Amino acid sequence: MLMKHALAVVTGGGSGIGFAAAERFVAEGARVVISGRNAEKLQRAAQKLGENALPVVADAAIADDMRRLYETATGHFQCKVDVVVANAGVSRQTPVRDTSLEQFSDVLNTNVGGVYATVREALPFLARPASIILVASLAANQGTKNFSAYCASKAAVVSLAKSFAAEFVESGIRVNSISPGVANTPIFDSLGMTEAQLLEWSRVIPMKRPAEPAEIAAAILFLASDASRYMTGADLAVDGGMSGISPF
Ligand SMILES: NC(=O)c1ccc[n+]([C@@H]2O[C@H](COP(=O)([O-])OP(=O)(O)OC[C@H]3O[C@@H](n4cnc5c(N)ncnc54)[C@H](OP(=O)(O)O)[C@@H]3O)[C@@H](O)[C@H]2O)c1
């Protein structure tokens, strides 16, 4: 599948990695539908992307919202969906002693339930072949103090990609996950992290800097396109060396 004229749906496409992926898809000649909960943010993002982008307000963790999104996308562009990027996600500091089961479940509901609904509701609307990319994280494989909910949710996302891949391999649907390390996006605003804390994190990255969203988008484009046609059930690390290189 070439990206020219392809239809891609990117959840959480109004900012950060999702927006960068949408921007890259449009630059390659694709049409994109971006979704999120904040209508104004989506509208601004769609304006920047131009006429080949359609914003749809939809909560990724609500199945009815996702069904409506795919109906709107395929109706508007009059074709099936070639690429789904299940990117919407939240990060919260959840120190175990101070985090209720409800707060824990809230992170899991968005990051895992949202990915599940995004993929499940897409199925009747997918072209063949199709490529699904789940945005996981380096955190899937690294226990991180105060982030147990987020880490557990991302481990589940990597696992979902593998089981989805197994279930869909004979129907021409590829499913892979991508695991960014630290990328420079608004997700850190919601964590209340200071510049100094982010700099501290950057020091342990072998490449000594966070990724720009466009660098993660380049890997998402690879998984979306024919260039990765022999890949399914894989997790692609895009982390400046964090998962592969010892700090010693
Ligand atoms: N930045 C990093 O260092 C990093 C590293 C590894 C993995 N990731 C993952 O990358 C993905 C994108 O994050 P980002 O860093 O680009 O941060 P971001 O700019 O905050 O993007 C997250 C997007 O998800 C949307 N979203 C959140 N909950 C949603 C829901 N229930 N339904 C629909 N949309 C929802 C948000 O839009 P609304 O507020 O409008 O809903 C937002 O546009 C996330 O899954 C994140 O976990 C990020």
Image (cartoon, grey):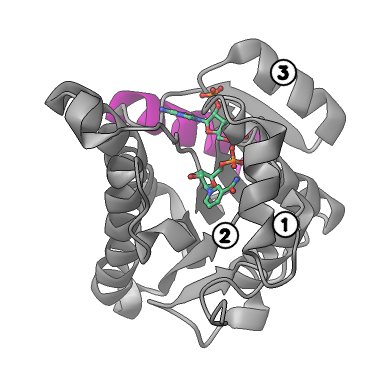
Which circle's residue, 1 or 2, is located before the other in the chain?
2
Residue type marked 3: Gln
- Which residue lies at the image location 31% right of the left edge and 26% below the top edge? 62
Q: Position of residue 83 (x, y in %)?
A: 56, 57
Compared to 147, does 65 lie above or below?
above
> Seen in the image, is 185 located left or right of residue 180?
right
User: Which residue is labeled 1 in the image?
Assistant: 211
Looking at the picture, does residue 7 appear above or below residue 117? below
Residues rendered magenta in the picture: 63-79
Q: Which residue is mark 2?
A: 181
Q: Nearer the viewer, residue 105 or 34?
A: 105
**Residue 153 image point, x, y percent:** 30, 48
Q: Is mark 2 within 8 Å of ligand 1?
A: yes
CB under 8 Å between callouts 3 and 2?
no
Tell me: 155 left or right of 69: left
Residue with the mark numbered 3: 43
- Residue type at tag 2: Gly
Along the line of sight, the residue nearer the viewer: 165 or 82: 165
Instruction: Give me the C-alpha separation between circle 1 and circle 2.
Output: 8 Å
Q: From where the camera sits, is residue 181 visible?
A: yes
Q: Cβ(mark 1) to ligand 1 < 8 Å? A: yes
Can the viewer see residue 30 in this picture? no
Distance from label 1 to label 3 (Cα)?
25 Å
Q: Is residue 205 above or below residue 85?
A: below
Q: Secondary structure at mark 3?
A: helix
